[in-house]
Image (tube, grey):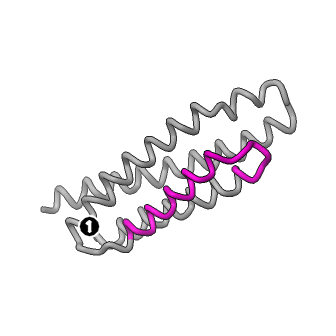
């Protein structure tokens, strides 16, 4: 049982780290677009966002799903699902700057869900 809890905590830490990388990507993209308009296209390529979203969904399903099974609390998964929904909505927006704010907000909410999940298993 402790081994499962340990793995679950590791998945949540990995997901929180991925959320941090997403925020760095969003900020770097905004700076790159402002400073280097032609090079900025590489950073805001929609495929990067789609792959990141797929990773976030996959880690969320595994870590938050196992969390419900381990500790029985649905709140971390609900908070994480809200964050994923915000990220999904942001990916549909035009690249006018607003999508960066919605993505960062969604990533932060998802990371909060993973942190709540990690704390509930400890």
Q: Quadrant of residue 8?
A: bottom left
- Residue at (22% x, 61% y) in the render: 5
Quarter of the figure with the N terminus:
bottom left
**Within the magenta stretch, is there residue 113?**
no
Q: In the image, what residue occupies the spot 45% across and 41% down?
A: 54
Residue 68 placement, left or right of 87: left
Instruction: Tell me residue 120's x, y (percent).
Output: 32, 73
Answer left or right for 99 relative to 56.
Answer: right
Total count of labels = 1
Residue toward you, 47 or 4: 47
Badge 1 marks a residue whose secondary structure is helix
Front in this rendered view, residue 91 or 117: 91
Residue at 53% x, 64% y: name it: 109
Q: Position of residue 119 (x, y in %)?
A: 36, 71
Residue for badge 1: 68
Q: Is residue 64 above or below residue 120?
A: above
Q: Horizontal placement of 54 versus 95: left or right?
A: left
- SS assignment for the magenta stretch, majority: helix
Q: Is residue 94 magenta?
A: yes
Residues rendered magenta in the picture? 76-99
Neighbor class of circle 1 (other Cα within 10 Å; few <14, some 14-19, many 20+) is some
Q: Depth check: 112 or 88 in front? A: 88
Point out the image quarter for the C terminus.
bottom left
> Quick check: 99 left or right of 121?
right
- Tell me residue 103's x, y (percent): 63, 53
Residue at (75% x, 42% y) in the render: 95
């Amino acid at each position: 049982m402790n081994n499962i809890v340990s793995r679950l905590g590791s998945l949540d830490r990995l997901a929180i780290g991925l959320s941090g990388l997403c925020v760095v990507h969003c900020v770097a993209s905004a700076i790159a677009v402002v400073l280097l308009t032609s090079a900025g296209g590489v950073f805001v390529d929609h495929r990067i966002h789609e792959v990141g979203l797929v990773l976030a969904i996959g880690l969320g399903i595994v870590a938050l799903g196992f969390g419900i099974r381990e500790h029985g609390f649905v709140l971390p998964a609900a908070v994480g699902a809200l964050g994923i929904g915000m990220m999904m909505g942001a990916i549909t927006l035009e690249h006018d700057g607003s999508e960066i704010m919605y993505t960062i907000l969604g990533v932060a909410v998802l990371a909060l869900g993973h942190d709540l999940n990690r704390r509930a298993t400890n």
